[in-house]
Every structure is written in C-alpha cells, then in structure tokens.
Image (tube, helix red, strand yellow):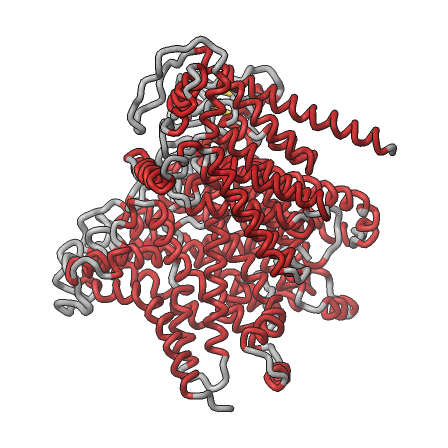
Amino acid sequence: MRKMKPLRQLLSQLALGLIGIYVIIPIWGILRLTFDGAIKSRATEFHWFPKEFSIQPFLSALDRPYQTASFMTLFQNSMLVSVSAALAAVVLGISLAYAFARFRFPGRQTGLFVILLTAVLPPIAFTTPLYLLLSWMQLRTTLLGLAIVYAAFAMPFCVWNLRAAFQAIPKELEEAAFLDGAGYFTTFWRITLPMAAPSIAVAALIAFLMAYSEFTIGWLFVEKTETVTLAMSIYAILTSGSAQPWSQIGALAILMSAPVVVIFLIFQRTLLERMMFGTTTD
Amino acid sequence: MNKTIRALLYLIYTLLVFAVAFGLRTYAANNLSIDYDEDDYLRAGQEFAHLIKTDNWSGFLETNYRPEHPQLAKIMFGLSIVGLPEKPLIADLPITANPVSTLPPDLLAAARNMSAIWGSLTAMLLALINPLGGLILAVHSFTIKYTSQVMLDGFASLMSTAAAVTYYLSKGKTGKTKSVFLIASAIFLGASASSKYLHSAVGFAILIDWFLSAREANETKKFFRNAFLWGVLSLAAFFVFNPFYWPDPLERIQVTYEAVSTTTTNPNVEKANLPTWQPFIHLSSSVPVFWNEEGFLFRVDGIIFIFAILGIAQTWKKNRFIAIWLFVDLFILLIWRTKWAQYILVATAPLSFVAAEGIKSTGANLVEWWQTRHQRGKEAVKPSRTETVRAIPWLMPGLFAFLVLTIFPLLFQIAISIISLDGNSLRDGFQGGIWREFWGGVLGQIEPNNLARDGKVHYIGFQWYREIFNWINAMGMPFFNTMWTVISVTLQTVLGVGAALLLWQRGIKFRKGWQALFILPWAIPEAIGAMLWLNVFVPLWGWISLAVKKIGPLTPLEFFTNWERSPDTAFLVLLVVALWYGFPFMMLAASAGLKLLPQEVFDAAAIDGASAWQTFRYITWPLIMPLIVPAIIIRAIFAFNQFYLFQMFYFVNPDFNMRTLASLSYFLVYDWRDFTASAIINIITILFLVVLIVLFNRWSKAGEGVTYA
C-alpha cells in the first residue's frame, strides 16, 4: 500500500475529525447528562463531563421509568408487540412474496407497483383507518391491536424484500427437485425456504426494529399504562415536559437503543443491502 | 400556410389572450376588497392628477408620495384618474395601518381598470413570443390579483416584460433591426426600474445572457462596449422617467434609501416573520380563499408552478435567456428582505413561459407513451395460464393478509375522506353511520352536507379535498415538504460521499475507527437521535444555550440560540439534525460502490494528469452512480415521510407550517380527532409518492431495482 503524503494525511484527518466531532456532539451531550448524579431535573450549567459521576440514573430508569409502569413491563410489552408483529409480517408475507417472485399471472405488474407503493408510504397513512377499524372491533387499546398495527406497517416492506430474496434463488434448483418427483410444496419447503432463510431472518429483524423503535404512533392505540412500550414511554416523558430528570430520560433512551445500535453494528452490511431494497451487489 | 394569414391568426390569438386576461382582471377589479397600500398609490395618483390639472409641471420634481418607490407607475395612476372630478386627498396613514375600508369608488375603479389594462398587455406581450405562456400569465391568480388592484407591479411588470421581449426578439436579428430592439429594451428597462425598483432584475438577466452569447461567439470585447452603452441608456431612461431625481440626484437617492430601509424593517415585516422561501410558497399556491373569497373564477397557480418545474430543463436548452430571467428573478425574491405576495409578480412572466414549455414537453411525453404502448405490450412478460393456476394457492393466504392489513385500510380511508368524521361523530360512525353516509352519498341518496355539527356523520363529497389542499398550500406545506426532501438529501449525499472518499484514500490512517464512529447515527433510532439533538439545541437549557450562558454572548454559538423564533434558523437546525441522521447511509452506499472500482482506472487517470476534481467528476462519480442513486431515492422517500424529527422538535419549534405531511396527518388525528382531514392528507401523500416513484423510475435505470423489475 502506497503511503500518503503527510500533508494530505493531516488534512484528511482534520476533515474526518470535524465530521467526527459533529457525530459525537449529541451523543456525548446525552452521555454526560446520564452519568451525572447531580442533575435534579434539567441541566442548569454547562459542563463537558458529569459533575458527579453516578450510575444512579440507570438504576432509577430500571426501576419505574414511566408513571406506575416498571421497566420490565415496558420492555415486555415492547418485545411482545415487536416479535409478534415481525412474525406476522414475515409469515404472512412469505407466500405472497414467493408468488410474485416465481409466477407470471395477470395483474402481476400492477400488484408489484402497489406493494412497492405501500412499502414506501409513511406509517401514518395506515394509521388513521386502522385507528377507526380497530376501535370498531374494540381491539384498539389492546396489545394485540398494537401488534396488528405494527404488522401492517412492516408487511409491505417484508413482502418486497422477500420477493427479491426468492428471486435471487436460481429457479433451476427448484426445477431439478421437481423433476426428481418432489411436489410444489415439498420443493418450496425443502429447497427454497432453507436457502432464503437468512434473508427471511433479516426481513424479520427489520420488521422487529420498525416496531421496537416506534415512538409516537402507538399512543393512538393505548389508554392504560400497562400496554405502553419502552419507546413510547420515552416519547411521552419527553413531550409532556415532565419533571423527570433528564439524566434518567437519557438513561432510559440508552437502555432502549443500545440493543438496536449493537444489532446495526453487527449486521451493518446485510441491513444496508436490505434497506436498499436489495440493490447493492456486493 | 400563407404568411399573411398566419400573421393574422397570430394577431387574433394575441388579442384573444388580451381579452381573456382583461375579462378576468376586470372581474377581479370589481370584486376584490381593498388591499394594503392601495390607498397609498391612489393618493399618489391624486397628487399627480392634481399637478396635471393645474399645469403645475415643476411640481413633478418634488412630488413622490411613498418615496421608497419611484414615480412612473404612480404618475400612470394619476393619468388614469385625471379625467375624473377631484376628491379630497386620501388620508395619509402610517405604513403599518390595516387596509382602509373605503376609497372614492370612481377613482378606485378607474385606477384598477388601468391596472387591468397593463396586466392584460403584459400577457399579450408574452403571447407574442410564447402563445401558451401568455395565456398562462393571463389566468395566473396572483398576477390577476395585483394587476387588478391599485398596485405598482402591473405597470412595472409590463415594462420589464417589454424589456425582456424586445431583448429576446433582438437575438435572432442583425444590423439595424437588432439595434432598434436593443435600444427599446434599454428604455423599457429604465421604465420598469422607475416603476418599481425590484422589477429591474430583468436587466441582470439580459446582461448575463448577452455575455454568455457573446462569449460563445468570441465577441466579448464587443459585448462590453455595447452593454456599457445599453446600460447608460437605460440609466438615462430611468432618470428621464423620474423627475423626482432631477433636482438633486444624490440627495434623492438618500431619501429613497431611507424610505426603503423603513419599509423593509417595519413592525409588520417583523411580525409576519416569513421564511426566506416564502416567495416560493406564494408561487406554488394560488391566492388563498381567506384573503379574497371573491374575484377569481378559478385558482390554478399551483399547477402552473408544477409545470414550470417540469419545463425548466427544456427551457434551459431551448430558450436559455428565459431560464436565466426566471432564475435571476427568483434569486432576487429570495434575498429581498420583505416577502409580500405582490413581489412575486417580478417572476410570474418568465414562470408562465417556462410552465408553457413544461406543458408542451409533458404533452409530448404522454403522446409518445401512448404511441409506444403496443410495442411495450409485446415486450412485457406475458402471464402464463399454467403459472397462474400454480400461483393461486401461494397468492391466497398472503394476499388475504395483505388485503386485510394494508389495502383495505387504504380503501377505507377513501371512504372516510368523503364523510365528516371527528371525535364527536365517532359514536354515530361506529353505530353504522360510516356506511350509511358513505353508501348513501355514493349512490346519490344523500345530499352533501358540509356544515352540520350535530355529532352525526355526514356525507360531504369531495369538496373537502380542495379546501384541505388550499389550506395546506396556503401554509406552504407541500412546498416545504418538497424543499425539505431536496435540500436534506442533497446535503446528506454531499457529506456522505465526501466522507466515503476521504476514507477510501489509500494509506489513510484509522479508517476502521472513523467508519465505526460515522455509522453510529444510522444505528440510533431516529426519535432517539432527535432527542439527542434536542438536548443540544433546546432553548434555555440545551447544551448550546448553557454554553453561551457560561462563555458569554458574542460567540459564534450564539447564532444557534433563539433559533426557534425565526423560520430560517429553525429550518437550519432541523437540517443539521437530518444531515447527522442521514449521511452515514449515503456514506455506506458510496463506500460499497467505491470498493468495486478498479484501481487501474485511477492510475491511468493520474498518469494522464487528471486533476482530483476531474477524476471525481468523470471517473469516480459515474462509476459509483449506480449505487448512489438507489440510496438517494431511499433517503428521499424517507425524508419526504420524515416524522419523528418533526414530532420531537415540535414542542420547542411550534411553527405549525414547518412540518411534513406525515407529521400533519398525525397531528390531525391525535390532537384534533379530525379523521376526515387526516385521511385526505394521507391520500394527498399517497398521490405525491406515486408521482415520486414514477419520476424516480424514469430518472434512472439504476432505480430499476428499487421500483419493479
């Protein structure tokens, strides 16, 4: 590897350093609050570092972060809702995706356009009607209702992605299995599905993350504290301007988003590819 | 066709444009209520009419009521009322006063009709060089409004359009004819400047185009001589048309300057607190109904604006001068401090020309699409019967779920959008009201009922669509949403590609470390990211505010305190956050592309002595484009739908207008329980996204993977 000229190296490092500062400022801002035991409500003085280093904010956040709800309730709700939404979206999406990937049938082009369109719509576009429909069915304020809403948000994206995944599997493999006497379903179950498993897992992961980090819209589907999710509680504490210390809000935010960040860092290539709707080639 | 007949037909057509324009303008002149400033210019007209009647010609040297504007257009208003019996002088009110309730009706009518004639002549003049463009200008509602009230812009834009048209016509001519046209354009320019200063922007456009053309013909020397003479001539014309400047030009410039300073900094300007991009909001929406309920047969400015966007590329290729004219005018509007709606008349003439080109090229595209439909039908993959049969069992379960979860809600939304459903009528709605009114309305058994507020659901038909669209348009939301998408994604792309290029250099140190750091914002959920920045920016107790409090004012950081009070700085702050959140994705996409590039190409370029910029422009960028474009499209869709950022910042930046449609829709459901309005906003969003997808699909083959392959 050729060496860079020192001046160019220096200038490049300076430029990268500037971007680095830009990236780090808000993160550092919340970290310094979170580990500060001296903050009673809002920050009142400028400091680079915590005035009184403490992990107390984390302990309080793990105790009763939002009204009467314990951290475990919030977390459980988050997991329950997100996992069931992701499962529903993927399981229900698989067959549709497979049909669009493999068969030529009338209306296919239109169907693809509709799926793509629904995949790029903002979630709120489904929310208004779902609010009414679920109220009507008296499911609106239940965890099941919330899971249905999040599944509806995630499903178009999952279908679109899984279609790309199925298309990437050579058709010849299926034909060979078929010639060997396997039925259509056996071929799918034994050959196609296992090969698509990694992509399916990633689609499910994205659907999970969509639901897990949904902060705002869920509030339309909740009336009692028992059905609030972790992300929603953060939004509520923030926008209600409550007296909760910011160090504690920060701690809650970190607890909530740390797993997401870790997942992103581990799976960055795959997630990038999936989020680009399968257009990256490498 | 015979040349004479053609010329005759053309003449008839331009007269027809005049007739249409004049009809619409007189209709408006008779129906519009009295607006700000009309009393001022009518009073100025009275003064000049009095001078003319009393043969007091030297009075022209001293008379200039409202000296922030030059005299000529006011003198014209004087001429319009000189034949009428004199009335006591209209009261001199402070500049911040509300519109007066009455003005002498005969004077007002005469002056307004004069204004209408100027406006109609402008449309006719434009029709000379672009028939469709003239017609568009004739029906443009903001142009109609300010050329049928006692406003200076009517005469000023007639003069500036005349300057542009004569220059435009001079381009194809040679010798004496060319000189005559150029002299005329200089005089018209002088006249437009002496009607309203801002309208002289067209002069800069002429000079730029003239220079560019001369450079292409290697005649720059000749250009400087001629342009100098031309400029002196137009200045002289300005001086001649403004007797006010004759006694002591320098002192009078001083007077004008002071008057302009007071008008651009008066409390009304402060109170309005309009964003820099406000002219675009006016241009992209028609005259709001709540300004003037009467006076317009139709309001289609928004459509004209959209066609202008579609036509700009074509105009740049075919009629560069017109494109420059539009750009210069828009630039002036952006930097001018006062943002009142009448100023956009500076730009509506070129805008109409460009919109006409947009309509033509869109029409041509549609015709082509229609003509090639058979060919495309042959190329398309034919459905096969056996496959259709085999597809059915696969389609069934997924399709069922998809229909229930996704399609049905969207269709249900259309039903809600034509009935009135809010928090009060929800109970009735669930007890069968929704279906009763929806089917009753669709089948024509129930008359639309817009007004009843009795806690019951009512069929309202499609009329709310227009009202809601006008409402959000008057607030500039569709424009804001589009501008937000374009600017934030552009910034993200620049920084993302820049960072990727920096990290891609051979031998760069700490590459892995930097990359891992830069990815963080992408990995953090959007709402948490917004919250992190909130902690930095929030007024009074944010990091920046605390830092300013500690270090003291007058640091550069102070710029970022009080940002929530002005739409411009609030926009900047939101962009800072959006850039932070979005650039890593672009960086990753660009890095993935850069990794695939063969090093030999760059070695070859280096040997050939290509500069860094050339290497990027002609080698790197084209090669990574296929990966960047899909990423841009995804970010653009994301930015268009941006939600959490606006939700989180809303409680410190309660500028209602500055939000995306997605965020507005949530607000309507959550805060107002107005399900109908929210559903309509959602449907508008869906239409926008359909257009976006179709455009992206056309824009680049690289987008194919994103749209349907």
Does residue A111 appear to the left or right of A8 in the view shown?
A: right
Most extreme residue toward the right is B2
Q: How many marks?
A: 0
Question: On screen, B13 above or below A133?
Answer: above
Can you say which quadrant of the picture contains the N terminus of chain B?
top right
Can you say which quadrant of the picture contains the C terminus of chain B?
bottom right
User: Residue drawn 36% across and 32% down?
Assistant: B67
Question: On screen, B449 above or below B604?
Answer: above
Q: Quadrant of residue B627?
A: bottom right
Task: Please state the horizontal and vertical placement of residue A18, each as a whole percent of the image.
Answer: 35, 71
Q: Is residue A78 visible?
A: yes
Does residue B688 appear to the left or right of A141 in the view shown?
A: right
User: Residue drawn 58% across and 74% down?
Assistant: B614
Between B519 and B600, the residue placed more toward the observer is: B600
Task: Please state the horizontal and vertical placement of residue B528, each as a whole percent of the image.
Answer: 34, 57
Question: On screen, B248 above or below B147?
Answer: below
Between B617 and B47, the residue placed more toward the observer is: B47
Most extreme residue toward the top is B85
User: Residue drawn 83% across and 50% down?
Assistant: B375
Does residue B331 appear to the left or right of A232 in the view shown?
A: right
Q: Is residue B437 visible?
A: no
Task: Please state the horizontal and vertical placement of residue A243, each as a whole percent of the image.
Answer: 17, 49
Q: Quadrant of residue B302?
A: top right
Task: Please state the horizontal and vertical placement of residue B262, each as a whole percent of the image.
Answer: 30, 37
